[in-house]
Amino acid sequence: MSDFELTAVQAVIDQATAAGVTIPDSVQAVVDHLSNDHVYPGGRLWAAAHPDETTWPVEAVICCDPATYYGPHRCTCWEPVYDTVQAPPVPVAGPDDLGVQPRMCGDCAYRPDSPERSEGFTERHLLALPAKAEPFWCHEGMVRPIAYRHPALGDIPGDTADWRPPIVNGVPYRADGRPGLLCFGWATRAAKASRNRTETAQ
């Protein structure tokens, strides 16, 4: 499950709680578990590729305390192998230093056929962001681990949707050190929402 999907699920839970709906502890526990798994992508990917516990070598369960106590999916020994070298981020001075992607990417989350819009709860969360002026960043130019490397187990291929740019004060940075660009699809909808608010206020 991606960061975006986890954020969307948590948003639904928060909205339900705010509306007075009692959320079972087991539901929140599942989300917390998935969130923890996402913090350790190498271990999660390796464990998913080796679902039969009897095949786990000793190196996968005694290399660190989290792996020993919680299982290989929580192993902290995996190091990301990035697709490119990350330059030091050049911090922005203000909103004027941020830009918008000049066109909609072929895999833009705001396209009607995108994976992010294939599920109702993620689509609702995605489409609500522009109206709330919550930024949604384009991943183009950002670093992605093509693999994770374990000192004893070797490499496991990375997740193609696992973008991991450095984030400074809420702004993700591209591999060349420049700040990320805001998503074109998001910006188009945010501009429309802003116009609607202005027209309503007049």
Image (cartoon, helix red, strand yellow):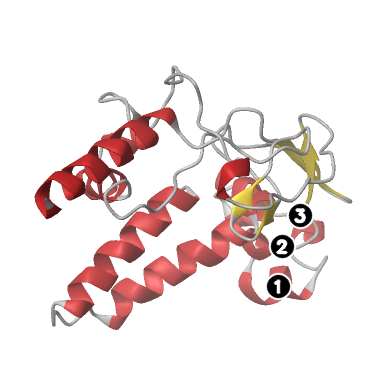
The residue carrying mark 2 is: 75
* Vertical relation: 157 (above or below) 16: above
Residue 192 sits in quarter: top left
Relative vertical location of residue 75 with respect to residue 101 in this rendering, above or below? below
Mark 3 crowd level (few <14, some 14–19, many ≥20, 10 Å Cα): few
Q: Which residue is mark 3?
A: 57
Residue at image coords 38%, 35%: 187
- Image height of 99 relative to 53, above or below: above
Q: Is residue 113 left or right of residue 76?
A: left
Compared with residue 199, is residue 201 higher up or lower down, i.e. above or below? below
Q: Amino acid at mark 2?
A: Cys
User: At 46% from the left edge and 20% from the top edge, which residue is drawn?
Assistant: 105
- In the rendering, at what x and y percent does residue 135 appear? 44, 48
Taking the spot 78% from the left edge, 53% from the top edge, the residue there is 78
Residue ranking furthest to the front: 202
Q: Nearer the viewer, residue 27 or 179?
A: 179
Is there a contact, CB below 8 Å, between mark 1 and mark 2?
Answer: yes
Residue that carries the numbered disc 1 in the rendered image: 66
Residue 166 picture location, percent across and down: 71, 50
Mark 2 or mark 3: which is in front? 2
Label 1 and label 3: CA atoms lie apart by 16 Å
What amino acid is at disc 3? Answer: Pro
Q: What separation in Å lies between label 2 and label 3 (alpha carbons)?
A: 13 Å
Label 2 sits on a secondary structure element that is loop
Which of labels 1 and 3 is toward the front? 1
Q: Could you tell me which secondary element the residue under label 1 belongs to?
A: helix
Local SS, label 3 = loop
Q: Is residue 3 left or right of residue 47?
A: left
Estimate how packed mark 1 is, as few (under 14), some (14 to 19) or many (20 or more) residues with alpha carbons within 10 Å: some
* For residue 2, side relative to residue 130 (left or right): right
Say which amino acid is labelled 1. Pro
Of marks 2 and 3, which one's residue comes earlier in the chain? 3
